[in-house]
Structures are given as structure tokens and as C-alpha cells.
Image (cartoon, rainbow, N blue to C red):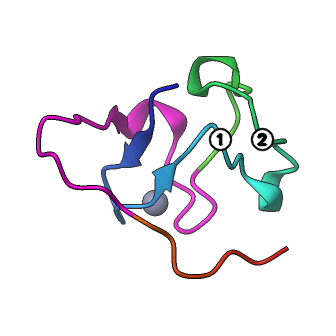
């Protein structure tokens, strides 16, 4: 599933992770987020996110995930 990036702060919405701050469970695609969902870091509107392009070939590996 496609990741989306906040234009304001660079937060990445990863559907595989979801958004625990907004009670978005893992597995919810960006397109299925509620229209009033906002960036958990800066409260930017959903419409100001852009899809992440994966042509750079760089893999981001999270060092630690809070559970
Ligand atoms: Zn943001």
C-alpha cells in the first residue's frame, strides 16, 4: 500500500502501521482515512499530503517502534 507524506512536516503515513494517535489501525489505506483525519504531528489536513514516490530506491527501516 502507498505511503503518504505530510507537506508541512514530512510525517509519513504508512498504511502498514496506521496512526495510533488517531486510532487508525494498521492496514487502513490512506484513501480510507476519514476526511477529518489530520497529521498527528502538525495537524495538517489530509488534502495536503502527497503520495511517496519509491523511485529513489532507499529503504527506510524504523529503528524502534513503540508498542
Ligand atoms: Zn505534518
Identify which residue is drawn at 62% across, 47% down. 38
Identify which residue is drawn at 64% across, 24% down. 29
Percent coordinates x, y for residue 59 in the rendering? 30, 56
Mark 2 surroundings: few (<14), some (14-19) or many (≥20) residues within 10 A: few
Outermost residue, top direction? 31
Task: Tell me the magenta residue range.
Answer: 39-60
Mark 1 surroundings: few (<14), some (14-19) or many (≥20) residues within 10 A: some
Determine whether 6 is above or below 53 in the image: below
Determine whether 15 is above or below 59 in the image: above
Identify which residue is drawn at 52% across, 66% down. 42
Q: Which residue is mark 2?
A: 26
In reply to whether residue 6 is colored magenta, the answer given is no
Residue 44 is left or right of residue 51, and the answer is: right
Determine whether 31 is above or below 44 in the image: above
Q: Are marks 2 and 1 in contact (CB under 8 Å)?
A: yes
In what quadrant of the picture does the C terminus appear?
Answer: bottom right
Lower sequence index among marks 2 and 1: 1
SS state under label 1: loop
SS state under label 2: loop
Q: Which residue is mark 1?
A: 16
Amino acid at each position: 500500500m502507498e505511503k503518504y507524506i505530510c507537506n508541512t512536516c514530512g510525517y509519513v503515513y504508512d498504511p502498514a502501521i496506521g496512526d495510533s494517535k488517531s486510532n487508525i489501525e494498521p492496514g487502513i489505506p490512506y484513501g480510507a482515512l476519514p476526511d477529518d483525519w489530520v497529521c498527528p504531528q502538525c495537524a495538517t489536513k489530509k488534502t495536503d499530503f502527497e503520495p511517496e514516490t519509491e523511485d529513489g530506491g532507499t529503504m527506510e527501516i524504523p529503528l524502534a517502534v513503540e508498542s
